[in-house]
Image (tube, rainbow, N blue to C red):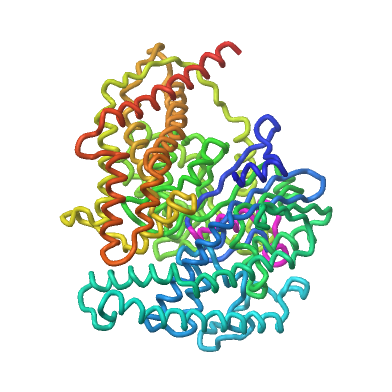
């Protein structure tokens, strides 16, 4: 089921025809995009606490906010599929069992059980923790006042219930220890040696592969998994309000709620979005796929006026990992064509480093530069001996932007780079002190917020008229396709360890296995930063975007560069969506059975065999030694389809 379509059936997302602008917020984890969003919707940091914020990865689902002038507050919240929850629980049990064998403490084993390695799925939110969350740690007490006051009694999990949760968790952790200890002996018997007696890293890898296989099929693990899943489902019975729709397995699909009272509305919503430690044991946040709310979400300050008609979309952070092979999730790029403004939120203390730079390149390749806005948070913390005035602070950050953009100059065309540079020079906003109440912000920040809101509303009326006809000569596109494929395969040769002479870090086999499982069983095309579909489509899109600059034959040679760029961006946009579908089909959908076969591999030597099988999948989808004529033909077909679509739009607009 498409969760977004389910939410649409409950609360349709308005668009340009309704006078609404759709705004997408993206940025690194902890950059402050959700804190900025709070100011735009008048959400009080102390009392409302919506959406939730933290320095760690907090927003793990889509948060969609539709602003209105009046009417009741309504919500539609969808949940991740039951099969995905099963997969996450199994991986948490497996990680905890590994921790037992590695000699970790009870506290560390419990942490592994309650916190999935991806940090998206936290069982501690749902089941509680071993520790008393009200205790203070004097050893690391810096004397700071807590930014969050104690919660009202009707929102906190009572102390006796927290103790009950802790007792139940101790039983679960004891079961993990018993299972792991028993299966350690079984593993050593099967492979013929104990882990402690192994010296070679390959022997260790074989041992762990057998151990994982035994754990996955253990009846005791299956019983433990069922106990955890039962407790997860029990948490839905604690909901006080709203209507819950379930599937044939009694797993929740969507929860809907309506209230005229903003305070009561947010109190109920927080059980699906909060991360407050005093609510651990009842929170449903890790199980949520998307939160859509509608109501009078307006800034609290009169200077900002009534909020314009906006759809504000906040999602998971981009992460922090810096890598030449870094890509933007398909979940993010899928939204590009659906929104009117892409707001990149970054930290002014470390501007445009790693993932934000990757996002800018992707935005440029996808023809979305005209939708881009750049905002910097923590501007008040930009300090140094060389910074004495506000203008020096601005100049310092802008200098960092210029330096960062210079790194893109070799990967995108000069024309596109110049437009990107100009766009960021015009549409950049600086915010500081956003952890304070809006009323306590300096006048300059309020002015920037007002200008920013005005820009967001203007996005609904931006000019999209296309006036020029053209022709793309695809006869010389072959080298671009080949370069794009080679770039993708080079990344994966390193990750899979296929070519030992290639420089780079091989991915740990457990991460490759986790990716394999998602493609084979869990219906997603990525694991953490491993994103083969996004990487192939991104590599091809980058090369095709650059090729477009010289491939277009304009029927109106005297047309302005502005009009030409607008048409080429429209072509890039259509190609981007189609290339992503092409990559998904070639790498994943068409070869699903091969992914499933690779996922079934287990035991000694399976990690190397799996890497080889995945490499074979990539070779069929994107052959590197010599780009297959059939692959080149299909990519050319994508480009020609995009050309036809854009030409039809030009013709249609000319008729109007």
The picture places residue 82, in percent across and down from the top left corner, at 58, 57
Taking 209 as reference, is 123 left or right?
Answer: right
Q: Is residue 128 visible?
A: yes
In-front residue for pair 12/650: 12
Q: Quadrant of the N terminus?
A: top right
Asked where in the image residue 564 lies, by quadrant, the reply is: top left
Q: Residue furthest left?
A: 501
Q: Residue sitting at 74 percent across and 68 percent down?
A: 238
Please determine whether, in this image, residue 175 is positioned above or below residue 597. Answer: below
In-front residue for pair 108/519: 519
Please determine whether, in this image, residue 15 is positioned above or below residue 633. Answer: below
Which residues fall within the magenta stretch? 29-48
Q: Is residue 495 visible?
A: no
Asked where in the image residue 555 lies, by quadrant, the reply is: top left
The picture places residue 274, in percent across and down from the top left corner, at 65, 64
The picture places residue 40, in percent across and down from the top left corner, at 66, 51
The picture places residue 334, in percent across and down from the top left corner, at 51, 41
Magenta stretch holds residue 337? no
Taking 28 as reference, is 191 left or right?
Answer: left
């Amino acid at each position: 089921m498409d969760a977004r379509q389910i939410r649409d059936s409950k609360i349709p997302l308005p668009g340009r025809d309704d006078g609404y602008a759709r705004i997408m917020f993206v940025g690194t984890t902890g950059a402050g995009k959700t804190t900025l969003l709070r100011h735009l919707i008048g959400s009080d940091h102390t009392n409302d606490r919506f959406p939730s914020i933290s320095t760690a990865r907090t927003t793990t689902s889509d948060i969609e906010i539709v602003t209105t002038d009046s009417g009741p507050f309504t919500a539609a919240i969808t949940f991740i599929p039951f099969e995905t929850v099963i997969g996450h629980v199994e991986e948490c049990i497996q990680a905890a069992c590994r921790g037992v064998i590695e000699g970790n403490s009870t506290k560390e084993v419990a942490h592994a059980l309650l916190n999935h390695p991806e940090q998206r799925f936290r069982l501690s939110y749902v089941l509680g923790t071993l520790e008393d969350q009200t205790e203070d740690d004097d050893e690391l007490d810096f004397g700071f006042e807590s930014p969050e006051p104690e919660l009202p009694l009707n929102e906190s999990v009572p102390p006796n219930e927290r103790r009950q949760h802790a007792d139940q968790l101790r039983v679960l952790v004891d079961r993990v220890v018993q299972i792991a200890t028993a299966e350690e002996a079984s593993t050593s018997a099967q492979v013929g040696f104990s882990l402690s007696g192994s010296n070679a890293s390959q022997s260790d890898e074989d041992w762990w592969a057998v151990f994982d296989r035994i754990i996955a099929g253990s009846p005791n693990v299956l019983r433990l998994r069922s106990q955890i899943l039962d407790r997860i489902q029990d948490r839905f019975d604690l909901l006080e309000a709203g209507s819950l729709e379930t599937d044939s397995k009694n797993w929740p699909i969507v929860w809907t709620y309506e209230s005229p009272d903003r305070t009561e509305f947010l109190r109920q919503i927080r059980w699906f979005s909060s991360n407050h430690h005093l609510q651990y044991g009842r929170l449903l946040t890790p199980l949520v796929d998307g939160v859509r709310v509608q109501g009078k979400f307006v800034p609290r300050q009169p200077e900002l006026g009534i909020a314009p008609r906006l759809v504000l979309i906040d999602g998971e952070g981009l992460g922090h990992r810096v890598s030449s092979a870094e890509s933007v999730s398909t979940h993010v790029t899928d939204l590009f064509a659906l929104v009117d403004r892409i707001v990149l939120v970054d930290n002014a203390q470390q501007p445009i480093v790693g993932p934000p730079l990757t996002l800018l390149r992707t935005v440029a390749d996808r023809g979305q530069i005209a939708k881009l806005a750049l905002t910097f948070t923590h501007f008040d913390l930009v300090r140094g001996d060389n910074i004495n005035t506000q203008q020096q602070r601005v100049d310092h950050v802008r200098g960092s932007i210029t330096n960062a953009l210079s790194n893109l100059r070799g990967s995108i065309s000069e024309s596109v780079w110049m437009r990107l540079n100009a766009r960021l020079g015009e549409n950049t906003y600086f915010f500081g002190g956003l952890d304070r109440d809006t009323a306590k912000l300096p006048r300059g920040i309020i002015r920037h917020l007002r200008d920013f809101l005005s820009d967001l509303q203007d996005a609904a009326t931006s000019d999209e008229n296309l006036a020029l006809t053209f022709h793309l000569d695809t006869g010389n596109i072959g080298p671009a396709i080949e370069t794009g494929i080679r770039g993708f395969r080079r990344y994966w040769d390193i990750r899979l360890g296929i070519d030992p002479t290639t420089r780079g870090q091989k991915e740990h086999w457990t991460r490759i296995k986790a990716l394999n499982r998602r493609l084979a069983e869990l219906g997603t095309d990525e694991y953490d930063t491993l994103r083969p579909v996004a990487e192939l489509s991104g590599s091809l899109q980058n090369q095709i975007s650059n090729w477009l600059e010289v491939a277009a034959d304009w029927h109106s040679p005297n047309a302005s560069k502005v009009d030409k760029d607008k048409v080429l961006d429209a072509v890039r946009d259509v190609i981007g969506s189609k290339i992503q579908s092409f990559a998904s089909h070639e790498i994943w959908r068409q070869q699903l059975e091969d992914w499933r076969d690779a996922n079934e591999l287990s035991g000694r030597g399976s990690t190397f065999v799996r890497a080889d099988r995945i490499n074979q999948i990539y070779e069929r989808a994107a052959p590197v030694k010599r780009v297959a004529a059939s692959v080149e033909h299909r990519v050319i077909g994508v480009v020609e389809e995009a050309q036809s679509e854009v030409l039809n739009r030009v013709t249609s607009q000319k008729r109007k």
